[in-house]
Amino acid sequence: MSSAVKRLGHFLRSIRLERRKDTGRSLHFVLIASFLSCMGLLLIFVLLMLVPRLSALLEKNAIERTKETVMQSVNTVDNYVDHLLSTLYYATTLLPADMDTDTAGWMNQMELVKRGNSSIVAMAFFHADGSLFGATTGDQCASPEQVRAMTWFQKALEWGGTVTYFSKPHVQSLFQDQYAFVITLARAVHYQKDGRLTQGVVMMDIEYSSFSDLTENLALGASGYSYILSREGELVVHPRLQLIYHGLAEEDLNAVNQFLVGQGRDRVDGRERVLISATLNQTRWRLVGVAYIDEILALQNAFVRIISIVLLCAAMLSFCVASVMAYWVTRPMRHLEDTMLRVEAGDLNVAIEEQGFREIRAVSAAFNHMIARIRALMDQIVQEQEKKRLYELNALQAQINPHFLYNTLDSIIWMEERGRSREAITMVSALAKLFRISISKGRSVITVREELEHVRNYLIIQKMRFKDKFTYDIQTQEEALEERTVKLIVQPLVENAINHAIDQTQPEALHIVIKAFLQQEDLIFTVADDGIGIAPEILQNILSTPAGRSGIGIKNVHERIQLTFGPGYGLHIESEEDEGTVVTIRLPRNRREESESSAGKAKPTQGGNA
Amino acid sequence: MKIRRFLSLLAAIFLSTACPWACAEQEVQIGVCIYDGTDTFMSALLDRLVENAQGLARLSVCDSKNDQNLQNDQVEQLIADGVQALILNPVDRTAAGYLIEKAGAYNIPMVFINREPLLEDMQLFDKAYYVGASAAQSGQLSGEIMAEYFLTHPQADKNGDGVVQYVLLKGEPGHQDAELRSQYALKPLQDMGFGLEKLQEDTGNWQRLQAQDKMAGFLAAYGDRIECVIANNDDMALGAIDALKAAGYFSDGRFMPVVGVDATVPAQEALRQGSLLGTVLNDGENQAKAALRLATLLIRGEPVNEENLGYPLSDGRYVWIPYQPLTAEDLDEK
Amino acid sequence: MRKSIVLSMAMVLCVLALLLFGLAPESVNVVSPPGPAVLIVQDDTGAFLLQVKQGAQQAASEVGCALGQETVTKDTLTETVTRWEQRGASAALLLIEDANLREETATAFETSGIHVVVLRDQRANGAYVAMDERQVGALLAEFAQNYGMVYLLGEAPQRLEGVMDVLTPTQAILSATPAPEEQGCMIALTEEETHRLAILRASGEVTAPLAGMDPGASRVAWMADGIVDALAMDTPYAMGYTALKMALAGERKACLLPYRLVVKQEMYTAQNIKLMFPLLH
């Protein structure tokens, strides 16, 4: 259990909105967060702006409709009352001009009127003293005192004929043995008796059920209903009137008696109700419609519920969409990231697929180019390193040329056998010096002095062997002597001259001139001879043909110089057949390298990959 | 320095806006509800109210379109809007009691005009008043004109029996004015010693055409026995005259005394012509003035008496603006 | 990334669940109305039955249930019970005078699984709705005690107890018919006694005011004429209503309803119409 909790904690923490210091905020996260916050803002906006307003409108609408329904009922009752009042008025107009005699005529007409309306139970006319003039129920009537005690009689007289009195529902007891549950309408009437104007009261009993039927079946929701209240706030009509009278039910009239007419609310048994109280014409009554809020607002509640659910789903779906979209958008970038990590680990042979968004593609293409370029450069370096190694090997090899050594040793033995020890010693010491300089303690760069010493020793040995075949001259510039140079670059040229420039057909000796001098920023060696020269076709390719039989070869020298100092330096060969050859070695001036001595100015090396 | 300038600017703004407030306090806010804007007398009365309210009160006027429940809503709205008094012309005078109770709960004084609530309802609130013209008085005055005629013109009693045979054209059944006018119009004749015989009565519903029809019916039934026509208003009186003219009256010296109430322009014309015997002027101008004056006094909490009001006060809460009788002579004098 | 995918999946599931349950149309609380109820009577006439039926009808219409009526005898009992059982009756109200028949009928219905409530009479270990006899005594006593002397007439032990609950120990009580012109008020504890005393009063032999039980059809005339001053009326309408409500709720308890006192000034009011004029609607 606790481990699960721990895992959950880890999980939650990992999705916490923290900024990781090393790697920076994730774009994926930022995309999701920004998308979500946009959606979130939109949803909140909708919620705050739309929902309450629509909700309020729906509520208002529902209550308006309820009100309209109640007003319809009010109209029905008003029409009915109007009809009753017209009948009453008509009865009044039918009162005979001579009230003393014509009772029967009036009675007959009243009977007709009564038959025309089934809800009329009785009609009667009383004089102001309570005595009966005539009634449709016959002439058996209560005494005038009893009549005068009736509320409707008193009220009718009090109001003087301008307003009709509507009584509470009651049992009509005036007419002997004729009991009916009625509402009594009564109105004072002025008529002539004995030529004088007097008052009387016309009365009409209406069946109670015709009133109670008026408010039935009002569509105010499943539990809604309506009732009628008298001016005094007593129930006149109510669907549960008898139950209320028996104390088995009740109607809370507090709210209605407070706001009197219009709209109000109350709460009964935990349910909120809306009450609509409207006045009924001419009766002084009110009709109250009761509707239960949860019923009439069912639509509104459903609306709010549906909108909340929909919005919540929208929020959640937007999270999903945001995640997926963010994932999709950042996929090429992640691919890029992965590839770059692989490159970082050393694998240069990867290439990113150029796919996805334009920006990503541009970056991928650039990255691919970059990797290709790096690869090419690295290959180049490897190649050059290979060559360098090769040359160094060659150079190393050249330091000890076996043929030359063999021949020289032979010469020394020959001289020794012939007793020419002095020549032998010269040759041996020259050979020793030659090899000493060749090796030069492993250095690849020596002074010009040493290089020329090397050549001199070589020439000494060769002169002894070749005697009159050639002559030489070494001319140096004083300042050039201390310059630095790559070793073993002059001797191969001299060797070449000796091997190839001598014209066997001519008795004259080849003359070789070796010069070393400074020219501006360059160090120049020249090896000139007046030999047979080099054929143009050979001359063209001479710097590119591989090393000859004896030693390093010109190409080797040229390449070594170029490798060390760059393409602006190296060998230059001029030759004319039968005239001679001049080979020029060009090097940059380079006194001391800082890595080999502590003192001295270091001249900037020109170009080169040294 | 800057603060002082800012404060003085603020003060200037405040004062300039305070002035209308102060001025507005002089004006009181009164809500007015008329039972139906299409009623000519009431719309004229409304115009008088608006006229006289200039500079005195700000009126919020509602037309209740002959729907009491609409008026209930309008009154509720007016109370919510904060009116300081109400001038009400109820659609259903029997339902006014609820409005009186309601306004009473908010202690908003009410002045009813032209349609009078029941006394027991008026007594629910000590600041409920009524300004109107006594329908009884209008009936009485029209009756007096008739009685005067019969007194001065003995030939009016055609059969010479000392009894006035009359026909009655009543207004809308059940209407207070119709009842009272009918009742009281007969009194002066009685008081003058004439007997009364109602040949017939019927309702013209305040309308000329209906009255004309009914009169034609009366003429068909009773012909020359009819000695006079009593109508509850001028429109009906004129309708009766139309019927009489069609039957040959008002020419060749045949005359029938007809009285109405209201003193409308066509009635005055008929007076001049001599076809209408008399009518009674319903003084809308003074009713409007009295109502406004009364409302203003009540809002200001000043005592309501005849001095302050400028009009007679009955029973402490009724302002009866007298009707004026109008005959052809009265017109000539004007 | 993976975390957000997991979260997204979880959210999609939540969305589906919400849509399924949240947007489903609200199951209308279609509570099917209870099965029909039946009023079992021995004698199908009389104002009392009419009122009981009206009250039960009101209760039945409030829940949308049907109400039927059956007269039952010893022979037809089983068949009646079976028939109503087949119809899925939910309640049976019994208004039966014969105690044995009543008990048999009650047991028969109960064994068929139909809730039974007895009207007007009491039933041991069963549900019934009857008038509160003790309370009526108190009611009458409250009316009478202001008249000075109280004449207690009629044999009704429970009602007597109720009277005694109210009358103070110092109250003067007699158990004999008063002589003419004697002061005080008569309390008639039974319907027959009320009838007898009313006749005496009508003939003038007795003048003391009379407060009693329902004397029968002449109640209106006698009260109107002042022969009886106060009547304690039973409430069959309330009985029927209460009984059916109890039966539908399956309650097995005893319910006693209070009598109501009617005096002349109020005899014609709407409140008392069902008491004084049971045949009027």
Image (cartoon, rainbow, N blue to C red):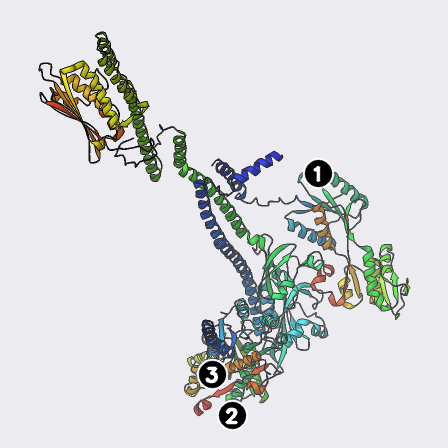
Q: Is residue A284 left or right of residue A401?
A: right
Name the residue located 23 percent from the left edge and 16 percent from the top edge.
A426
Name the residue nearer the viewer: A316 or B169.
A316
- Work out how far the residue at label 3 is from the one at label 1, CA to CA, in angstroms: 85 Å
- What label does residue B148 carry, if any? none
Q: Is residue A433 above or below residue C96?
A: above
Q: Are marks 2 and 3 in contact (CB under 8 Å)?
A: no
- Mark 3 residue crowding within 10 angstroms, few (<14) / some (14–19) / many (20+): many
- Mark 2 residue crowding within 10 angstroms, few (<14) / some (14–19) / many (20+): few
Q: Where on the picture, by quarter, is residue A253?
A: bottom right
Q: Which residue is mark 2?
A: B152
Amino acid at the residue labelled 3: Ala
Name the residue nearer the viewer: A179 or B234.
B234
Name the residue nearer the viewer: B261 or A285.
A285
Circle 1 chain:
C
The reply to whether residue A229 is in sight is no
Q: Earlier in the sequence, mark 2 or mark 3?
A: 2
- What label does residue C82 carry, if any? 1
Whether labels 2 and 3 share one chain:
yes
Q: Is residue A201 left or right of residue A384?
A: right
Q: Quadrant of the N terminus of chain B?
A: bottom left
Amino acid at the residue labelled 2: Thr
Whether labels 1 and 2 share one chain:
no
Name the residue located 16 percent from the left edge and 18 percent from the top edge.
A498
Q: Which residue is mark 3?
A: B263
